[in-house]
Amino acid sequence: MNPSSITQLFGIKFPIVQGGMIWTSGWRLASAVSNAGGLGLLGAGSMYPEVLKEHIDKCQQATDKPFGVNVPMLYPNIEEIMDIIVQSGVKIVFTSAGNPKTWTTFLKGHGITVVHVVSSVKFALKAQEAGVDAIVAEGFEAGGHNGRDETTTMVLIPSVKEKADIPLIAAGGIATGRAMLAAMVLGADGVQIGSRFAASHEGSAHAMFKDYIVNAKEGDTQLTLKELAPVRLLKNKFYQDVQQAYANGANAEELKQLLGRARAKKGMFEGDMEEGELEIGQVSGLIHEILPAKAIVQNLMGEYKAAIQDVKGL
């Protein structure tokens, strides 16, 4: 592990990246994390281009620290989104859900640091070949859209570290300083944390979704809809409807019709806890309160340093 490779790459104090989650990661959260010493990310996946521009502008006004934008490349308006990022002077972009070769050269040509999110060694090596500056290796525990191989973080991180040569950020199942240290011992240079920041005061998700997160127990999430795009969800009515569809022998097209449009927005942003798609990680069972982003960063670093001291006694 080499935390300085991450802090120097991004110009931040702590090797902590806040995940750019859809419907949760707006300018208030990103700027708060950046101001606290981590790297805040805007979640462009749930933003129309003009909305993304507004969030970039407000984030630039709210912090003079580095922040970035997470861009799932499967979303429409991708060309317009990339142009806005360049024109707005964003210096860090995390890409996901697509081929890193598509945009890495373009972004780096404009002086932008590029990080790509992967779920396997194969895709990590493809990202490295494409010229990205760092990799986020995200394990099966993570919330939202996930890898098809179902490789856990504890297996994925050392596997990627063994093969890849560029800075490595661990994601999936990390919400405490102890988990952060564990990821670093496995070979990560930093961590990306989503679920813990979803349950923050500054997160843009609906208050009812945040309450749902802190009340979640072990086993309350499940990876499903692999026929479309694997996604980890909390087990609400919509999830049960999906399971019933499977029991009835639904094919991919029928599952797509059940999913419909804007299902994640309905749940996570608008607060429909029954019919909405509630994306969160397994680690939600360890999240028990909604906190300011600054307190989350401080707690993570405090636990991390305490864990280092505990390990010295082994």
Image (tube, helix red, strand yellow):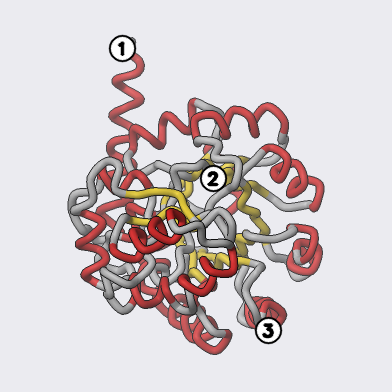
Q: How many marks?
A: 3
Q: Earlier in the sequence, mark 2 or mark 3?
A: 3
| Quadrant in which the C terminus appears | top left
Q: Amino acid at mark 2?
A: Glu
Disc 2 + disc 3, Cβ < 8 Å:
no
Disc 3 + disc 1, Cβ < 8 Å:
no
Q: Earlier in the sequence, mark 3 or mark 1?
A: 3
Disc 1 + disc 2, Cβ < 8 Å:
no
146 w.r.t. 205: above or below: above
Comparing 280 with 44, the one in front is 280
Q: Which residue position holds label 3?
A: 80
Label drawn at residue 237 = none
Kindly indicate the quadrant of the structure image that contains residue 97. bottom right
Q: Secondary structure at mark 2?
A: strand
Q: Nearer the viewer, mark 1 or mark 2?
A: 2
In the rendered image, residue 232, in percent from the top left (x then y), is placed at 43, 53
Kindly indicate the quadrant of the structure image that contains residue 312. top left
Using residue 262 as the reference point, say whether residue 176 is left or right of it.
Answer: left
Using residue 7 as the reference point, say whether residue 126 is left or right of it.
Answer: right
Measure the alpha-carbon separation of dots 2 and 3: 27 Å
Comparing 130 with 67, the one in front is 130
How busy is the neighbourhood of tag 1: few (under 14 within 10 Å), some, or many (20 plus)? few
In the rendered image, residue 40, in percent from the top left (x then y), is placed at 45, 62
Q: Which residue position holds label 1?
A: 313
Query: Residue at horizontal 45%, vertical 78%?
Result: 262
Comparing 28 with 196, the one in front is 196
- The answer to whether residue 26 is visible is no
Q: Which residue position holds label 2?
A: 138
- The answer to whether residue 273 is visible is yes
Query: Residue at horizontal 48%, vertical 63%?
Result: 20
